[in-house]
Amino acid sequence: MKNILSSIFLLFILMFWSSCRDDLEFETSTGGLRFSRDTIYLDTVFSNIGSSTYNLKVYNSSNKDVVIPNISLARGQSSNYRLNVDGMAGKSFDNVELLAKDSLYIFVETTIDIQNEANNPKEFLYTDQIEFHHSSDFQKVELVTLVKDAYFIYPNKSLDPSTGNSIVETLTFDVDGDGIDDETEVQGRFLNDNELHFTNDKPYVIYGYAAVGNGKTLEIDAGSRIHFHANSGLIITKGASLWINGALSIDQVQLENEVIFEGDRLEPEFANTPGQWGTIWLFNGSTNNQINYTTIKNGGIGLLVEGNQSEDFKLNIANSQIYNSAYFGLLGRATSIKGENLVINKSGQSSFAGLVGGHYDFTHCTFANYWSDSFRQFPAVYLNNYFADEDENIITNDLNSTRFKNCIIYGNDNPELILDPKSSSSFDVKFSACLIKFDDPNNVFSDPWHDFGNTDFYENIFLNLNPNFKNPTENQLQIGEESDANGHGSIEFSTLVPYDILGKTRVDSPDLGAYQHIIFMD
């Protein structure tokens, strides 16, 4: 009986093995593979900066297990593309197995040095193919990448002789205003004299913080493009200045004359991603900063402006836009800012916050906040005149002559304006001819500062009306014919800023905000 059972068991094992062996017999592929796409566009990359990883899915639609004799790049080992086929990295793969009705992933990346091109162009299309070789033919998927040359600014690196680790240069400058330079942990370096003029012939890519030293001015030409790596930005230190000389663009899509600051990830999915880089920091003691026709987007804080409250204005900013800031679009701390035709939208906290007092003057500005990535604690516009020190002591500072004229303050939360003064310092603020979103059904803000009938602080206010923005979630803050901001601007203030951000005259019948109304087209 035992022998009979053993024989039956052995027969079962042989039958099972035979069945498995038949299932794993692969035939050489003769073609007929399907692909998730016939061309992979790796979008745009800067010279010597790696791309994102893109994927291709390869399908075997047949009822047979196949082996693909070879998958490789047409340019061979010299190709600037890199492949990963089912977990294996390389540029050529032999005998790749693919089960019936199954699929496999191929991942593609590239890094290209534009200097290796014979013509050394400013930009060019780099192409290759993934080839799938069969017994008698092959199939292919195209690879296409636009490569741009750029000026690269980055801190120096050195080796620590004791550990052998790389040390990245950090900035040293007068942080606390005592006249003595302080060592910081901020990675970056000061710009050399020959780097203090950014032109528009090639983009700039900045790693770490590029700093402008005492007595120096960084001047940026119209049409310049500045890209920041993660945790990077600009610092304008004590005695230094920033002059951004953008100009009105004819093409409002390409913005050919605008100066644009953004991250260094050029793929479409990063086009509106907040927090890709740090900030443009106008440090305490920097002076005479001028910004015109500039777009600042996708930073942590778009513009951080500190100190110099007693100056006429530390920063003059006009005809500019700040979008998709992870924290604040424009953050002022005990400083002085003049803004005209300024548009700010989609900030993780406030689009504009004036903290610890200061001096601000805004005419025909649009402060919107349609942030939707997370919960935000602050309104579109927030003003206070104090801060709490490390021991929780309240330190106050005057808010002087702060004016909002012919402005829009709006967003997807409520209220979108909060005034938060401490009485131990002055709080001189007034809103004139402004459209403001503020609804307080529970009387949380039952104080004189939020009494819109109080003419000490408010005059000619349009409360909780509809600005009729074109598409605020896409940062399109133009207003339409049906806007309640249409025609409600004060001519007294419009004569100070006679043209809107697009160069359209507004003197005869001014609208509120940075834009004169337009007719929306379907």
Image (spheres, helix red, strand yellow):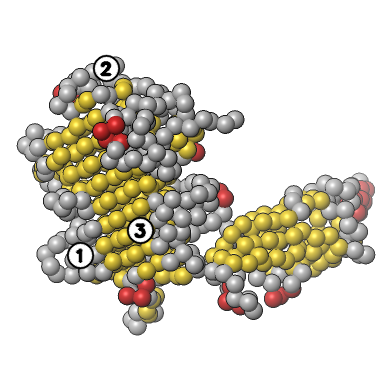
Name the residue beneath numbered marker 1.
239
Viewer-side label of 1, 3: 3
Ranked by sequence position, the earlier of labels 1 and 2 is 1
Q: Is residue 166 left or right of residue 74?
A: left
Name the residue beneath numbered marker 3.
244
Compared with 38, 351 (above or below) is: above
Q: Is residue 31 left or right of residue 299?
A: right
**For this rendering, which residue is in front, 522 or 508?**
508
Of helix, strand and loop, which one carries label 3? strand
**Marks 2,3: beta carbons within 8 A:** no
Ranked by sequence position, the earlier of labels 2 and 3 is 3
Query: What whole-number distance in Å separates the C-alpha atoms at marks 2 and 3?
Result: 45 Å
Query: What whole-number distance in Å separates the C-alpha atoms at marks 1 and 2?
Result: 48 Å
**Marks 1,2: beta carbons within 8 A:** no
Q: Is residue 504 left or right of residue 25?
A: left
Spot occupied by residue 277 in the image (x, y as percentages of width and height)? 41, 55
Query: What whole-number distance in Å separates the C-alpha atoms at marks 1 and 3?
Result: 17 Å
For the point 18% across and 60% down, the residue is 285
Q: Which mark is residue 442?
A: 2
Residue type, label 1: Gly
In the displayed orientation, state which residue is furthest to the top: 441
Of helix, strand and loop, which one carries label 1? loop
Q: Tell me the quarter of the image containing the C terminus.
A: top right
Spot occupied by residue 223 in the image (x, y as percentages of width and height)? 46, 59
In the displayed orientation, state which residue is furthest to the front: 508
Residue type, label 2: Asn
Compared with 113, 291 (above or below) is: above
For the point 42% across and 44% down, the residue is 503
